[in-house]
Image (spheres, grey):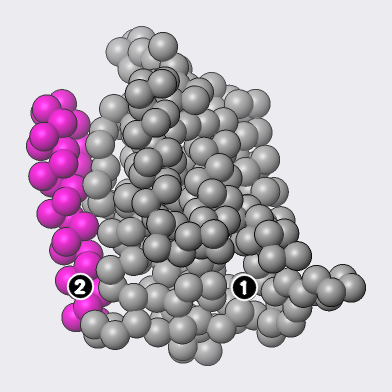
Amino acid sequence: MTYLFQILNGLGLGMLYFLLAVGLSIIFGLLQFVNFAHGAFYLLGAYLAYEGVERGLSFWVAMPLAALVVAILAGIIERLLLRRVYKLPHTFHILVTVGLALVVQELVIIIWGPIGGNVPPPDTLSGVMILGDFVYPEYRLFVIGFTAILAAGLWWLLDRTRLGAIVRAGSESPSNMALLGYDTLRINTAVFALGAGLAGLAGALAAPIRGVEPFMGVEALGIAFVVVVIGGMGSYVGALAAGILVGVAQSLMATLWPEGARLVIYLGMAGIIMAMPRGLFGRA
């Protein structure tokens, strides 16, 4: 039962990691932009959900509202700041986005303080599911189910719709898209906002599980890059598979070797890089 519990925990973690990483992967796939501020959007989503619940909003309102606000803010930041450095070398991408992440982190500390807080799960999901001797929190089951549905919806959006075709074509040949009359700047902004909004949603969903604290974005950024590297840059399927793999491995290791729960995912990433430099599903 202990291992089943940890596998389910890992599946829930993995789906949150997927939400976090797929936005990073989509942004890199379309814009070829290394976004080290991605963890800051996760942090912001968690704190906005926390603030909404603290002000009396239902979690069901605070969660999507947090993701929407993060997406809007990210779109504004992309238009005013980030699009100016797209054509510069990746070192400039790193410098600008690391600086942006530090600004967001310090603003969070100024507004909400250096001490974290807790976000209670919604009342309808505050209980547990009992199957014989097996007991599991209902909210964690909701996270697994909700993110699975969202993953299917994202796949449909990116793989089966005209919008998805435009995004994929833009990642392959932005110059041809411009010749066909598409506003590539608007597409870039929309995709960046979508990726950041997914990170904000992951933060809002994670808040009732792990609470909020000002440095959670740093950890989230590291996990996101691990998942993207293992799955393959720009790969949707890779982000999903790697997110689940990393989540389950980390959760199981928390039982078998608690001190190595984080170490194992970085060792796994190193092994994947040595065996498959492009990741599990990376494009050639």
Which x, y percent locates residue 204?
49, 67
Q: Which residues are magenta?
A: 82-111
| Element at label 1 | helix
Q: Quadrant of residue 181?
A: top left
Above-or-below relation of 121 to 32: below
Residue 23 relative to residue 142: left or right: left
Which x, y percent locates residue 238?
52, 31
Name which residue lies at 32% across and 50% down: 222
Which residue is under mark 1? 60
Residue 190 relative to residue 236: left or right: left
What numbered label is drawn on residue 267? none
* Amino acid tagged 1: Trp
Looking at the figure, which quarter contains the N terminus?
A: bottom right
Depth order, front residue of 258/122: 258
> Residue 106 colored magenta?
yes
Depth order, front residue of 255/78: 255
Depth order, front residue of 89/57: 89
Q: How many residues crowd around disc 1 within 10 Å: few (fewer than 14), some, or many (20 or more)?
A: few
* Amino acid tagged 2: Leu
| Element at label 2 | helix
Q: CA distance from mark 2 to mark 1?
A: 25 Å
Above-or-below relation of 89 to 119: above
> Residue 107 colored magenta?
yes
